[in-house]
Amino acid sequence: MSATAAKVRTASISTTGGCSTPKQKLLDSSSGLLVESSGMGSAFNWLWLAFTASTVGTWLGFGAFPLIAIEVLGAGPAAVSGLAAAGLAVGAVLAVPTGPWLEHRSRRSVMVTADVVRFAALLSVPLCYGFGLLGYAQLVVVSVIGAAANIAFTAASGAYLKQVAGPDHLLRANARFESTAWTAIALGPTLGGAAVSAFGPVVTVYANAAGFLLSGLALTAIRPRARSTTAPRTHENNTPPTHAPTPTGPHEPIRAPTPTRAPTPTRAPASTRAADHIRDGPPVRARPRRGALTDGWRFIGADARLRVLFRNTIAVNSLIMATEPLLAVLLLGELGWPAWQYGLAFGLPCVGGFVGAQLAPRFTERYGGARVLLVAGVLRALTPVGLVFAAPGGKGLLLVVTVELAVITCMGVFNPLLATERLRRTPDDRIGRVLTAWTVTNAAAIAGVTALWGVLAAVVGARAAIGIAGVLLLVTPLLLWGGGLRGAPGVRDRGPHAIQRPDIGRPATGRSGSLRH
């Protein structure tokens, strides 16, 4: 990651010792955004609001497509799993060129466009349902469009967050996003399930679409400010100095004064010029070089820490998400759970995610980020196997809530540390490609495993397929071996801070240690 961006003072500064006032406003030269020294600034607040709107809408519509497929279209386990798999797989393929393309586009414009596309695609579902035209094929098409837009948005937002929040606030920003996400997940499915019970299966799709619309509007409110390029003040009268007339000898005339030209402002290295990547004007077009599509994967594979985190998160996410449609089939179909109970079972445990996200920075300070990543990464894979014992009634609800609470609390600790580590270890000019590679692989793996588990469920049943996934999750902690995740507490990982622009395929990795701010 690049060094911390320099800040140029733009507001009143105390004359005593040159100290700034507590509410001093600073112009971040890397992003061109006006921020306050005591926080992350108004730009981050708008970004946070956009994230909140889209996240609340998404989790109000939790499970809407499987529910519509089951209750409206009469789809079975294979069709429900195929719906989730097809959207992710095709969307991932369409999003592969996104990484290199993002390097030459305004991040904010990409995010707004993705929000508008998702809004329009989702809005078509309730409209067609109202006219009696909704079919399985349309759900697949909307899933594909949403998956591709999600990948583009994720890659752009990760790069944008790094510039808006700055390196010193990354863990704090990611923890805040994680807390918001788990709060929305805790309330969204419960409220969404109640809304579906009262108003029908497509009402939460409206809420999901509205969330993306509000997100786009919030993003358009962010206004980058131009950076000042004036010469530094060198005299009290703000004029550049001139050399006094210089006598050169008794027989030589006095030479005329030579004006001193103001120094030309020095441009920051390419890896620190974040304003080149966050722009609202016409983008700089560049011809993608050969091999640019695979740069993200090559960078991940060459960094030991990112490599172990990558393979573990892909495996865990794939196995957990593969059981989501099967749990809908098992709980809503075979066990006859009402929609409100299904929403409550997956909404209530998300309080643990909020708590985990709040604890992540504290654990990092005390034990070191690397050690916390390792412990949370192991614990989050141990309890999902318990879902195989789900049953109808209150006992079944208590079991699912307990299992999900344990998993989600560990995820609340793990996720912000993972996001922070990934951004810190990736230089600015590679973030788009690395995040795209990560997201595309994650989506493709989830799609493949979900489709496979749909076929497996058709053969052995939904409950048995969920149990097999839980057993396989028990061995995923072995994928965290290596990469320096067993660092001693209190040791900083200085590798990312020592890297300015590592060559693709040969990123310099520093000492293994904690993930500290």
Image (cartoon, helix red, strand yellow):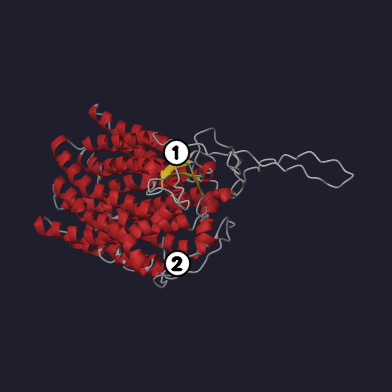
Q: Nearer the viewer, residue 241 or 74?
A: 241
Which residue of the protein is positioned furthest toward the front in this rendering? 250
Q: Mark 2 falls on what kind of element?
A: loop
Q: Amino acid at mark 2?
A: Arg
- Determine crowd level at label 2: few under 14, some 14-19, many 20+ residues with C-alpha closer than 10 A: some
Q: Look at discs 1 and 2 and give the one toward the viewer.
A: 2
Q: Nearer the viewer, residue 170 or 283?
A: 170
Residue at horizontal 41 percent and vertical 56 percent from the top: 420
Q: Nearer the viewer, residue 431 or 500?
A: 500
Question: Relative to residue 103, is residue 408 drawn left or right?
Answer: left
Place of residue 49 in the rendered image (x, y in percent of width and height, measured from the top left)? 32, 41
Place of residue 55 in the rendered image (x, y in percent of width and height, measured from the top left)? 30, 44
Residue at horizontal 29 percent and vertical 52 percent from the top: 179
State which tag comes first along the sequence, 1 or 2: 1
Q: On residue 492, which mark appears? A: 2
Residue 375, located in which quarter of the rendered image?
bottom left
Which residue of the protein is positioned furthest toward the right in this rendering? 251
Q: From mark 1 to mark 2, how far is it between C-alphas? A: 32 Å
Q: On residue 377, which mark appears? A: none
Whether residue 90 is visible to the viewer of this picture, yes or no, is no
Residue picked out by circle 1? 108
Quarter the C terminus occupies:
bottom left
Q: Mark 1 falls on what kind of element?
A: helix
Place of residue 195 in the rendered image (x, y in percent of width and height, measured from the top left)? 17, 39
Residue at horizontal 29 percent and vertical 42 percent from the top: 58
